[in-house]
Image (tube, rainbow, N blue to C red):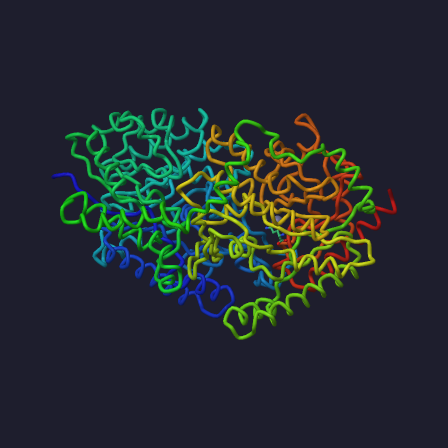
Amino acid sequence: MTAEKVATILGFPRMGKDRELKKCVEGYWSGKINVEELISISDKIKEVHWELQVKNGLDVIPVGDFSLYDHILDTAFMFNVIPERYIKATTNGEGLTGYDLKNIKAKVDTYFGMARGITMSGNIETDGSAQGVQALEMKKWFDTNYHCIVPEIDDSTSYALVGDSLVNDYKKAVKLGYRARPCIIGPVTFLHYCNNVGKRLSKADHAKKLVSVYVDLIKNLAGAEWIQLDEPVLSLDLDQEYVDLFLNTYNELLSGVHGITKVMLVNYFGAYEDNFTKIVSKLPIDGIHFDLVYGLSDFESTHAIDKIKNTISAISLGVVDGRNIWKTDLAISLEKITQICKSIGNAEIDIWFNSSCSLLHVPHSLDAELGRMDSEILQWISFSVEKIRELSLLKNAYIEPSLFTEQINKNKHEVTSRLTSQKVKSIPVQQQLKEIPSTSTDESVFSRNTDNYERRRVQRELFKLRKFPTTTIGSFPQTLEVRKKRQEYLKGIISKKEYDTYIREKTKKCIEWQLELGLDVLVHGEYERTDMVEFFGEHFTGFCKTNGGWVQSYGSRCVKPPIIYGDISRPKPMTVELIEYAQSLLKGTGKYVKGMLTGPVTILRWSFVRNDQSLQTTATQIALALQKEVLDLEVAGIKIIQVDEPAIREGLPLRKKDQISYFKWAANCFKLVSQHVSNSTQIHTHMCYSDFNDILHLIKDMDADVLTIENSKSSLKNFKGVKGYYEADIGPGLYDVHSPRIPLVEEMKARVHELLKIFTIEQLWINPDCGNKTRTEREVDLALKNMVQVSRELEASF
Ligand code: GLN
Ligand code: ZN
């Protein structure tokens, strides 16, 4: 048999063209549709997607990439990694007399229960009580913006093959006439994401038990030519323990399925680097996937290929970027592929033209942008369907170059037009960038002029805040009414003037409300913003928004990241008018309102970024644009400015060697924003969703005057101890705003007493752990009343 050329992808986005999946699972949660409808609608979505992929040129389609909520949760569920408490709660506390897996509703409710929690009343939206069972934790999927569920394993976890949806999907796809490839999250990556709460068994012990279930599963898939095992942990620095875990697990797995099917080992988000020699080259695998967008370094020499070319039967080349939206430069990709094929020489190896990773991280198709997005920008972009067409074209052009020169030339013209477009380059921005010192040479280049002791002294004198000052993180409830008004404005039903007046009124009420509550440092409520990035994206040059560019963030939640395509500047003030107005309402009170901005790293992380310059350069441009805003706010008399950086921790590169420079430029970009403000201007920042103990050095380096921080997940233990003190002001969130539960005065006070073991009275601020945006006004009112009371009682007792 001669070697075959195959166009395929590692996975397709699940939501559907019009987010049908979101609508259907949310419809099920709210009782609008029943479980049979949920299954039949989601089956239909899968089938539509298979057809779409083949129609657009794929030879082989992945199955098992679809999920009702999350693929790690699916894997856990399939292997019976289901904590008993969820099964119990699904049967409404009646206890379990035989969990009937054939009962489809019980199954689906247990599945969603693990993801979202279960209350005894059965409705997690309205019942905020502590009864019931909490959801499993979520974690970022490597360095993407996708969050997966963290399964829980313990000593009694009994692995078994209980789910059959993968096998069923595979059979269905085959029956429909497709060449399908089952995709499974590999055992090591799966265990990597599991939380081991057991005392006795290590992850290696678990792997020994788990591997036989993988073998069972693969045996059930007999008939499939290939199985795809995703092991993106291979993009991480793996210690010896992991290397051994990998080798042992895979030797066993591969010998168990030998002769049944071929295994394609898949890594993405980076290069294998040393894991190639230490692990991959030692395993008898049949095929190997390379991420040629983010892991190109594996091909700096032909070393990798030489090692495996005589033992594998297929090589998968991930040349189309699965996590960014730029059109592939097909000529360059063809060149890369040709080079690799040359080093393979005469070996009979199939070539897969593949996406770098699953297309989960990019939107569905450009259809929703046609006629809406600027046509020049549109020709630079590919979403999932367009990326599939690229892969098909690449394969065809590789086989028969002469037939496709026109299309390859057209592509070349389009991708190069971006690099030379007037839209992309701004001379003043480039000039300004040149003028700022190189961040690689000096760590203190962007520091404020004096040290933080002096700033603190000046600010204490000016603000005269009470002990345990209270504040909030920024947003107040975005009620249905607020969202409705915005829709009306966007649809042209109400004028800009009417909308602005409405926003002002809301802001005014918000200020009055906070005064009534007795808060010390106020916010304007962020009613004018849908989210933290879009608002700034709309005001900066170099950004464009999409109409339907939805990407799954977790479960049914999708985000619509803006696209950064060009040099970034801020043509005019964005927030000054409204903040100034809010401050004017405080005349005579001696109180201040915080200016509220999103920081450069967070804006970068939550957008699709340019791939024609470094992340650092783009972040520096954003920082310079924000710097202008900060200075304008200062001129307008705003004395306190918050620059939010909730995403700063998640930007951390996967490999340690890349992390050092990230820490440096991320902190520098943050500092650049407020570099030129006077000592008396107080800079706040806010961070959430992470463990902060391991980035204390970064936090210190950012040098904010006040840090409000979500900390339900970490104890902040390192903030005082061997690794050094944290000396600036800090407001560790006293309660979780993501829960509708009203925090009690006594429990918040107890929390402060705990915090006083780490921080001084002078340092501590009293605040929630994140913005109030998603809460109801009643919940916010009650929670903040209690919170202010905590501050007052503490003030009186110290
Ligand atoms: N200022 C923002 C808000 O309150 C911060 C949100 C966040 O940290 N994610 O909504
Ligand atoms: Zn937050």
Left or right, residue 780 beside residue 487: right
Q: Which quarter of the rendered picture does the C terminus lie within?
A: top right
Query: Residue extending furthest bottom?
Result: 493
From this view, report whether residue 381 is shown above or below residue 732.
Answer: below
Q: Vertical placement of 714 versus 531: above or below?
A: above
Side (left or right) of 52 relative to 22: left
Residue 472 horizontal/vertical position (percent): 70, 52
Question: Residue drawn at (78%, 52%), measured in percent from left and top?
Answer: 520
| Image-based side of 501 in relation to 318, left or right | right
Residue 16: which quarter of the image?
bottom left
| Residue 448 x, y percent position in the rendering | 67, 36
Q: In the displayed orientation, state which residue is furthest to the left.
A: 1
**At 23% across and 57% down in the image, what residue appears?**
175
Q: Position of residue 682 (x, y in %)?
A: 72, 44
342 horizontally vs 274: left or right: left
Q: Position of residue 341 (x, y in %)?
A: 20, 34
Q: Residue at position x 36%, y 48% from top?
A: 418
Q: Where's the N terminus, which quadrant? A: top left
Camera sees residue 470: yes
Who's the residue at 50% across and 68% down the image?
31
From what the image shows, is residue 650 above or below residue 636?
A: above
